[in-house]
Structures are given as C-alpha cells and as structure tokens.
Amino acid sequence: MTDLRLSPIAGNVKSIQVCKGLSLSAIPDNGVLILDPCVLPLLGKDLLSKFREIIQVEGGENGKTEERFLSLLLQHREALEQSDCLVAIGGGGTLNMATSIAHAMASAGHAPPYHIVPTTLLAMVDVAYGSLGRLNRNGLKNKIRCAYDPTAIILDPVFLRHLPVAEIKRGLAECLKHALLQSTPDNKDRFPTVEECLFLLKKEHPSVENVFPVAEKTLNAKAAVITAINEGNKLIENILSYGHVDAEPREGASGLRLSHGDAVLLGLAIEAALCGPAKMDETIIEVIPYTPLGKELNLIDFDSDVMREAYRSSGKPRFSLGADRYRVVRLSTAGQFASLNKETNVDFMEFDFKTLFDAGCRIIRHSTMSAKSFANQ
C-alpha cells in the first residue's frame, strides 16, 4: 500500500492511500462496517470477519434518506457506541450515509477512527475527498448536510474492474469538471486534462489502467481546492459546483432517477454555453452520444413549470439570488483556477430562470441530434 502524493490533506484526514488488493490489517477487530451489499462478493471472509457488526446500505439515492439514517442509528446504536473503528465501503450514496453516521457518533461524544473505501469512480473523485455527509429529505436531494473528515481514504483500482462502463463514464464527468477548472499544459502530470477526459468518455470500454490515474489526478485537483478553502478562501468553494446549477434541479425533476454524473455532464455543457469556456458546450455535445446520457435525453427534457419548481426546491441555495434569478461561475478559459490561494477571486454571471431553461433546452436538442447522427453511423 502506498500513499497518494497530494497537496496538504484537508481537515483531519491523516492519509489517502492507494492499494492493490484491499487490506485492512491495521483496522481493530471491534469495528463496524457500513457497506453497499453489491460489493460483498468482492470482499473476502477474513476481512468481513474482523467486524463486530455489518450495516448494509443500499447504493444510490434511495439508500441515503433521512428515514433510513434514523432507522440505522436506532437499530445499530449499541454496536456503534462500542465500536473501536468505523469503516465504509461503497459508492457515493453509501459513503454519504456512513459519513452522516460518523458525524452523529462524534456529535454524541464517540469518534473512533473512520476509514472510507470508495468503490465507484464518482465516489473516488467527488465524494471521498471533502467528506460531506448528504441525505435526502422528502424526495429532495442532499437537503441534510454535514461535514466530517475520515481518518483515511483508501483507493483500490480493483473495484473499478467490476464497475459497469456506464458508471465509469458518469465518474469521468466529474473528472472533466476539474480538468476544465484547473488543467493547464504546465500541470498535466498532476491534474486531469480535458483531452484525456474527453478521450476516455468517447472510448467504448475505457480501461482501468487509463482511468485510475485520472482519478488520482482528480483527487490532486480537488485537494488543491479544499486546501485553498481551508486557508480561508471560502469563495473558492463555489467552483466545485461548476456544472451543478442545472444538475441538481434536473435530478430532482427526474425523481432522482437521473444519475448525478449524467446530470453534471449536461450541466457542464449548459454552463459552458453561458459562461465559458468558449466552444466547450459544442465539444461536450459531441461527446454525449458516447455516454449513458445520450440514451436518456428524451427522459429529462422537462417543461418549464417542472424545471422552475425544481430550481426553486432542489437547487443549491447559495446560487439562488431570489425572484427566479441565479448566479453561475464564470470560466473564461479552461484552467482558469490552476493556481489557487486565499486571494484567488471567483467571478459570477447572473441569469434569470428562463435563460438557464432555454440554454438547457438548446443543449438537449443539439445533443439529441448528435445522438441520432451517432446511432446512424
């Protein structure tokens, strides 16, 4: 097992480790394991036997509800209170739930070591680092939030080998976001590049050997953002939501059936069309047919009333200016945020709902045409 060389670790995270062949030999035996049942076949009996109790949490949005959270705390209260460690293995939804549980334990005065093992690309690059616990309430995404740092984040590429191609590409959308924000020719060895993300998105079967290094570089990029935030530049936090102003409302309008990665890819195209980088919306439209989003466009082309309500109820509050007006991060050129510090400024552009909605309709229409052309090749 080797340490992943990153910028200074955010908060209280002691280490981020890369391993081949998951080993938790240093974990105390009297621990609680929270996992997505889908990964059970990938874990050996010896590893599972180390834990006093195993809590299974369904992956995806359905497993991270407020009701489920309260039920798990009550059902497993004794084991959690007496545990010597907490380990979470799973995708983003499972890690959201586990972090919420770890935060609740710490708030109650019991904070054992907390180790997380993300098993999807999206969880590796979007959920693990930054360590937010997010729960859904009344069908609305991420309405309950907390922040709690794990003791360690453990990355193992073996999980990506068992991941469907569609899930790989959904994770690559988040990698592309960081590439657009932070990649330049000078830092291509540390941060993901736009070119490699687009290349992998268009590959029919992107290999783990090519994808995993991009995941590592995306963690480097996110670490740079979080380090700047921890140094006092709270404005920088807004760039992490580039591509998300439309994404979360559209997920909400779909009843949370639209995958977050697909929503982000569409959101990147929408925000690029309005706020830059120039022509990037056209590039993303060309890529969409190669992704699972290309087959879902007709399912997410919601009418104005549905999207307006979704923006009001499901959107990120800090981007709402009231009266159906929203602000979006301006990205004049790709790599604009390659260098971050406590003085780095973030510019915004303001739009009314109709402008955002019309941009979304236009991107969906052009993407649909691109997908039809791709299917006829």
Image (cartoon, helix red, strand yellow):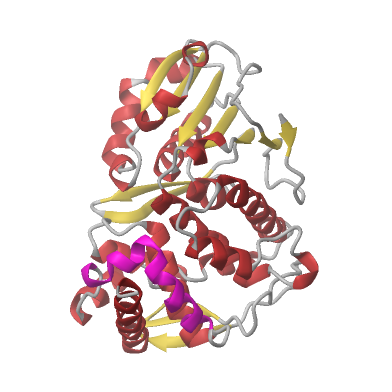
Q: Position of residue 141 (x, y in %)?
A: 33, 55
Q: How many marks?
A: 0
- Span shown in magenta: 280-299
The residue at 24%/63% (across/down) is 254
The residue at 22%/75% (across/down) is 302
The residue at 47%/53% (across/down) is 205
In the displayed image of the protein, which residue is found farthest to the front? 377
The residue at 35%/65% (across/down) is 293
Can you tell which quarter of the image residue 98 is in? top left
**Left/right of residue 186 with respect to residue 90 in the rendered view:** right
Above or below, comparing residue 71 to residue 250 in the picture: above
The answer to whether residue 154 shows anywhere in this view is: yes
Residue 88 colored magenta?
A: no
Q: Position of residue 63 (x, y in %)?
A: 31, 40
Above or below, comparing residue 131 to residue 376 in the picture: above
Magenta stretch: dominant secondary structure: helix
Observer-nearest of 239 and 202: 202
